[in-house]
């Protein structure tokens, strides 16, 4: 077991583009949820992990007391003595100096902050509850609390956003000199407020924005190590890297997914049902699949090709059906080979799903 993922499915307000499982924060419900979450965690008692990721939702929406309850208990349940990376997601409007100080003291050594845009008009359009000034204030607080590994999330390709707008956003973001950047194109997905509206995005514009940011960040000291992620040297997200390497991790919480003992599973996307199931002594899984050798090999290839710098050992393609597809991809230059490693051609990143589907 390499990783531990904790899902906190609470938000003050759900962002208009977000289809991750979350519900509106309620103090009483959150207390009951934490009790169930920790009961779930005990099923994996004394397991040793090397990365912890607390995501959501909005983990920082929890009160200081609730955060203390969750994180202090994790140290009692799991063996975290060898944890190399402990990531905590937060939104600017729900952060505070007290929370940041506690997170640093308890052992969190990496923050992931949802900025999404440097323009207040765009933040309002996306349904974000903070403005750019608040982000600046929280980022400065985090640095003052000695966080030296921070990721910033951005979204690009908003309606009416121009290449000039996007370039300005990147330039303003680079001023913060964060160790990591995660950049995602706006997509209109089901179960979101944007879905069914008249909001549309343009693939060509998003592609041009992607190409632009690749060029800017390459000249700014960032390595494009994964399709949507850039980092400074040795600042890649360990937890996510392990997932892309197809290593096992446990997912705790309503809506969380996990991959443990060759079983890929997902927990029920309902806070009330999650609480009731754990209270009654049942498991919370509603989906699970045993990953046999064939599926494991296929997933290893598809996930590994996301790692642009690392790629995959050519031996992962030893089965004839994968080897034949590999030869086709090398011939049409969607994949490349160097020193026995197979990598996605960086100019083909925007068509990754097409390339990956050839191995299914």
Image (cartoon, rainbow, N blue to C red):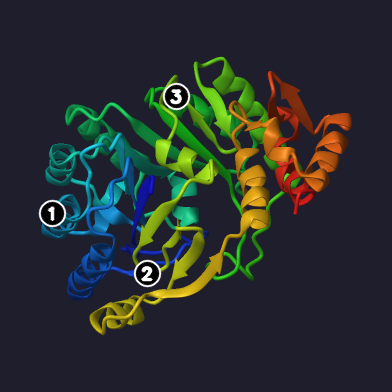
Give the quadrant of the C terminus: bottom right
- Left/right of residue 260 with respect to residue 339 in the rendered view: left
- Please tell me whether mark 2 sits on a helix, a strand or a loop: loop
- Please tell me whether mark 3 sits on a helix, a strand or a loop: helix
- Mark 3 → mark 1, Cα distance in angstroms: 33 Å
Q: In which quarter of the image is residue 273?
A: bottom left
| Residue bearing the label numbered 2 | 254
| Residue bearing the label numbered 1 | 68
Confirm or deny contact between disc 3 and disc 2 (CB under 8 A): no
Sequence order check, earlier mark of 3 and 1: 1
Q: Name the residue at 25% across, 57% down.
A: 61
Confirm or deny contact between disc 3 and disc 1 (CB under 8 A): no
Q: Looking at the picture, does residue 178 appear above or below residue 360? A: above
Q: How many labels does the image show?
A: 3
| Residue bearing the label numbered 3 | 174
Sequence order check, earlier mark of 1 and 2: 1
Q: Looking at the picture, does residue 150 appear above or below residue 234? A: below
Q: Nearer the viewer, residue 188 or 239?
A: 239
Q: Position of residue 269 (x, y in %)?
A: 43, 73
Q: Quadrant of residue 207?
A: top right
Q: Where is residue 347 in the image (x, y as percent from the top left)?
A: 74, 29
């Amino acid at each position: 077991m390499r990783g531990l993922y904790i899902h906190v499915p609470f938000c003050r307000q759900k962002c208009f583009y977000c289809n991750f499982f979350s519900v509106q924060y309620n103090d009483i419900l959150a207390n009951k949820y934490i009790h169930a979450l920790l009961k779930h965690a005990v099923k994996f008692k004394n397991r040793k992990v090397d990365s912890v990721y607390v995501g959501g939702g909005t983990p920082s929406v929890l009160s200081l007391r609730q955060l203390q309850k969750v994180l202090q208990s994790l140290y009692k349940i799991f063996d975290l003595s060898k944890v190399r990376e402990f990531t905590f997601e937060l939104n600017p409007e729900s952060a505070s100096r007290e929370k940041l100080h506690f997170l640093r003291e308890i052992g969190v050594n990496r923050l992931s902050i949802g900025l999404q845009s440097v323009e207040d008009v765009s933040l309002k359009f996306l349904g974000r509850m903070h403005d750019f000034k608040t982000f600046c204030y929280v980022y400065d607080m985090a640095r003052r609390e000695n966080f030296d590994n921070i990721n910033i999330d951005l979204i690009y390709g908003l309606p009416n956003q121009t290449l000039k707008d996007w370039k300005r956003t990147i330039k303003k973001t680079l001023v913060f000199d964060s160790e990591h950047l995660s950049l995602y194109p706006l997509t209109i997905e089901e179960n979101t407020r944007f879905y069914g509206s008249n909001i549309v995005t343009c693939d060509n514009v998003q592609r041009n924005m992607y190409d632009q940011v690749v060029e800017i960040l390459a000249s700014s000291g960032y390595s494009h190590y994964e399709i949507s992620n850039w980092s400074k040297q040795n600042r890649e997200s360990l937890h996510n890297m392990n997932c892309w390497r197809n290593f096992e991790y446990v997912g705790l919480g309503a809506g969380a997914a996990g991959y443990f003992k060759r079983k890929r599973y997902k927990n029920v996307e309902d806070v009330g049902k999650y609480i009731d199931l754990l209270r009654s002594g049942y498991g919370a899984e509603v989906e699970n699949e045993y990953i046999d050798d064939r599926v494991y090999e296929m997933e290893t290839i598809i996930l590994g090709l996301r790692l642009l710098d690392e790629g995959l050992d050519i031996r992962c393609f030893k089965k004839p059906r994968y080897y034949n597809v590999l030869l086709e991809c090398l011939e049409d230059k969607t994949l490349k080979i160097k020193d026995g490693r197979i990598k996605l051609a960086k100019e083909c990143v925007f068509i990754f799903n097409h390339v990956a589907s050839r191995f299914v």
